[in-house]
């Protein structure tokens, strides 16, 4: 380790994103991407981009995109901040709301980026263990000033009762960031809490339901004083011009997104039933992935055998997660291929 | 100020980017954009983008783009990290190399983002005053661990002697980031220092010479241990897919960029001569802008009068800069309009 690098960075374990293989023959069910393309309007935007605009800086505060997002949420554009992916939104929250001697809390297991972001900022981490079946537990009184609450949760695919979420937020002394990356696949959301409570921010992403992981767009909705603080510390031009235009086209065609979501939910239910039939424990998913436990504690073996068959799913080798696989819901054809491969393994295993 | 926001953020004065008016009738010489479009290959990339790729996450480490950048610099791709604009590169440098109880140094005046980034990270700032004519001064022994060295400098447009830069870097105990955002408009660069010294990073941008401010792409070249530390703390997918492809197309067509640079340098010299003729003090620019002092201490008045005539230039109302205007070099036609407007003001003024 170079003496020139900060000590805490040298010791840091970086976040490991799921594999992004370039081989198009691989069935990719490992990073919760949408199997369907985005609204055709997005491609139309790219087709008609004029060269003259490319040389200019983008709007630093995404005015037009925020107007479309505000219309979608029926709120004021001032209550919206757009990020270079919702990952940037999460990082900004720590930088804006957590003093160096304070801490960040989140449920365990949830999104594995939270502890990494906290470590980068050099603040303490107070994970709160979920129940035995990954169900909600009331977090103990701690001294954290930011709580990342993933709803629905990843990698467990479960949604918490909204009454638990709102009661917790009302009692929590700091900022609650409800990370709703997967919420369009669920039966309900918490956007109204961000518009009614003074300490709740809802984070959203264009990566999953809107099929736009490539362009890096996410946003936060929340109370004005919190959103304003995030504006002060974001990079000046954090969202590029093309992403602003593409995200705007996508959210203005939300019905197209909802059509894709409907297909994915149907495939999800069908795949969950088939996996249950095969002996897997399948948690009731409110996301675009399934969190499944094989009968005989063989999650890691199945993960590797699937990989040999060019089917990528996600395996998290940590205490609470190592008996499970996280399987993105792909197209019907992709899920049939997965089910057939698993079926063959169970017979031979 | 909300009690939920960090104290230092509440007190922070945010960076103010130059105006980005949407009115196409305005002559925009205020944010150092390139007046010419990027390589036609960039537009070609946008035209033929396939919808299928948009739904997938981008390569988190920009493999193909880095190969093209490495070929351009004749170095190893491992020595390159790409950022969401070079602003992100600068922020990553503070986060990676400056302990909380240490400090960041930079010349005054230089890029006004450095103190803002330092304040966001909560580290001390040690500005070093340039000489009376903005010339190099040897920074005093301080206890900073990062020095942002803008070469050529903004807003002064001057280039420092390379021998001064390399001697300073050799003696400096921390990391020297040579911010070469404008270097393609200069006679020489310092990329070789980043490839030969263990504490020097060179930051580059696609925004100016490559005419791609819209897409947010910048990168750092430097020693492996420093670049690796920056990778550990960047957002997982910090550069979107379209930007990766567009920047790659641009840097592989560097001759096109050099053609634009040649035109801009010619316009720069012609405009500098005309402004000198009109009584302005014009510093010898090695950038795509001119740093000029009107004869009668009327910089702010001229700035406002030009704005009334729909010509935007940049005015920095701070101690060292308030007698000057920063004027981006536009097309010949734009500069003729500027010169005519200034001429009329001088007669009437």
Image: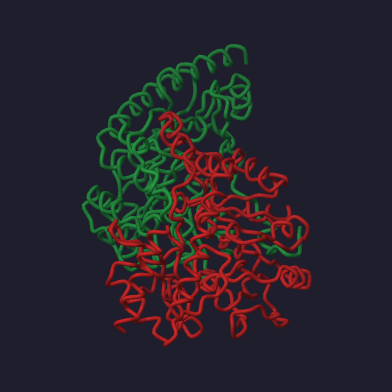
Chain colours: A green, B red
Judging depth in this view, the residue of B249 and A300 nearest the camera is B249
Front-most of residues A9 and B119? B119
Residue A320 seen in this snapshot: no
Residue B325 at x, y percent in the picture: 44, 76
> Looking at this view, is A108 or B255 the one in front?
B255
Side of B88 where B340 appears, left or right? left
Q: Is residue A40 left or right of residue B140?
A: left
Q: Quadrant of the C terminus of chain B?
A: bottom left
In the displayed structure, would residue B120 be above or below residue A302? below
Which quadrant of the structure image shows residue B229? bottom right
Q: Position of residue A144 (x, y in %)?
A: 48, 65
Which residue is found at the position 49% from the left and 24% from the top?
Answer: A280
Name the image quarter holding residue B96: bottom right
* Left/right of residue B251 with respect to residue B41 in the rendered view: right
Q: Residue A315's x, y, as percent?
A: 58, 34
Asked if A90 appears above or below A171 in the picture, the reply is: above
Image quadrant holding the N terminus of chain B, namely bottom left
Q: Residue at x 32, y 78 (%)?
A: B345
Observer-nearest of B335 and B192: B335
Number of numbered discs overlaid on the protein picture = 0
| x 54%, y 18%: residue | A342
The residue sitting at the bottom extreme is B296
At which x and y percent is residue B315?
Answer: 41, 75
Q: Is residue B152 visible?
A: yes
């Amino acid at each position: 380790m170079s003496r020139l690098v900060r000590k805490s960075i040298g010791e840091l374990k970086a976040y490991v994103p799921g594999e992004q293989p370039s081989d198009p023959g691989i069935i990719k069910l490992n990073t919760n991407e949408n199997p369907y393309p985005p609204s055709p309007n997005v491609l139309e935007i790219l087709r008609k981009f004029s060269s003259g605009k490319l040389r200019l800086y983008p709007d630093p505060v995404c005015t037009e995109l925020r107007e479309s997002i505000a219309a979608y949420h029926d709120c004021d554009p001032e209550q919206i901040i757009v990020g270079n992916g919702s990952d940037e939104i999460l990082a900004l929250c720590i930088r804006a709301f957590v003093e160096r001697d304070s801490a960040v809390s989140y449920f365990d297991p949830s999104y594995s980026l939270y502890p990494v972001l906290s470590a980068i900022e050099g603040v303490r981490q107070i994970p709160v263990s979920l129940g035995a079946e990954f169900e909600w537990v009331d977090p103990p009184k701690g001294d954290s000033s930011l709580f990342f609450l993933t709803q629905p949760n990843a990698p467990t695919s479960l949604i918490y009762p909204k009454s638990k979420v709102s009661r917790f937020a009302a009692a929590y002394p700091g900022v609650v960031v409800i990370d709703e990356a997967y919420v369009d696949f669920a039966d309900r959301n918490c956007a109204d809490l961000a518009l009614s409570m003074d300490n709740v921010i809802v984070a959203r992403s264009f990566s999953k339901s809107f099929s736009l992981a490539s362009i890096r767009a996410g946003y936060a909705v929340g109370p004005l004083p919190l959103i304003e603080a995030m504006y002060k510390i974001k990079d000046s031009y954090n969202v590029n011009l093309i992403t602003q235009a593409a995200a705007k086209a996508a959210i203005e065609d939300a019905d197209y997104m909802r059509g894709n979501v409907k297909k994915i939910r149907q495939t999800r239910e069908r795949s969950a039933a088939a996996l249950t039939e095969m002996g897997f424990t399948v948690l009731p998913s409110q996301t675009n992935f399934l969190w499944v436990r094989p009968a005989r504690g063989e999650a890691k073996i199945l993960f590797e055998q699937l990989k040999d068959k060019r089917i990528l799913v996600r395996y998290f080798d940590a205490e609470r997660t190592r008996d499970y696989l996280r399987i993105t819901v792909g197209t019907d054809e992709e899920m049939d291929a997965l089910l057939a491969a698993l079926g063959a393994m169970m017979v031979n295993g």
